[in-house]
Image: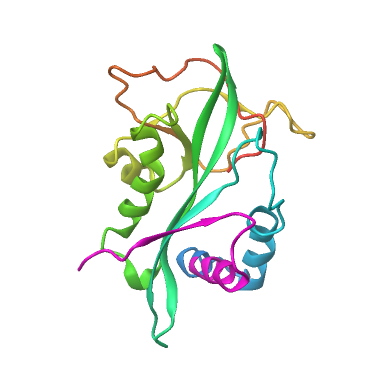
Amino acid sequence: MPTPPIETWTAGRIAEADFVDACALHHAAFPKPGRTLDDVIAKKRPVWMDVDRSPDPAADPPPVRYVVREPGPDGRPRCIANAAALVRTVKTEGGLMTVAGLLDVATHPDARGRGLGVVVVRRVFAAVDDGTYPFCLFATGPGRPFYEKLGAAVADNRVINSHADADPQANPFTDDFVMYYPADTTGRTPWPAGTIDLRGPGF
């Protein structure tokens, strides 16, 4: 079955109905006891909807969401897979480094087994493959083998957020494994050793 086109949605410029559809995908892909769709919408709205539509051109670009949609049971298009990307300038022991960040990877339970997760993640990784950014940085739990097959590796760096109010030395990621892509840096910038300061919250 051919893969439907990938749509690109930019934070602050997403239609309300599309935003709710993306939240519904996340809710279906990662159900949690007691969590409602409204809870997911409330958590994601500040990042994706309540943002400046005319950002400072000198600032990092707004996050984007790469989405695959196809008709659902009611015949209307719905999100069946997506992955989001942001840009973050982190601090390494060698200086500042601007990287891509990967988050919100999800495939609808009805669409699993079709390789759509690979398609949307590779769309995020494309900004590294073409040299726009030296690495993609992210965190995961059970998804570690999936990302390793795509060429990522677990980072053994200490990760902190020096901008945090509560504990600036704590790891701002909540998942078990911090990972980077590509693992193979032959002929490329090597992955930095030492502490990585996200200079912002985990994603």
- Image position, residue 26 (x, y; %): 51, 64
From this view, report whether residue 159 is shown above or below residue 2. above
- Image position, residue 88 (x, y; %): 58, 34
From this view, report whether residue 57 is shown above or below residue 2. above
Q: Nearer the viewer, residue 116 or 17?
A: 17
- Image position, residue 195 (x, y; %): 57, 19
User: Looking at the image, which residue sits at the far top?
Assistant: 94
Query: From this viewpoint, is residue 177 visible?
Result: no
User: Looking at the image, which residue sits at the far bottom?
Assistant: 74
Q: Is residue 112 left or right of residue 108?
A: left
Query: From this viewpoint, is residue 71 visible?
Result: yes
Q: Residue at x 66, y 72 (%)?
A: 38
Q: Quadrant of the C terminus?
A: top right
Residue range in magenta is 1-25
Q: Residue at x 54, y 11 (%)?
A: 94
Where residue 173 sits, quadrant-wise, is: top right
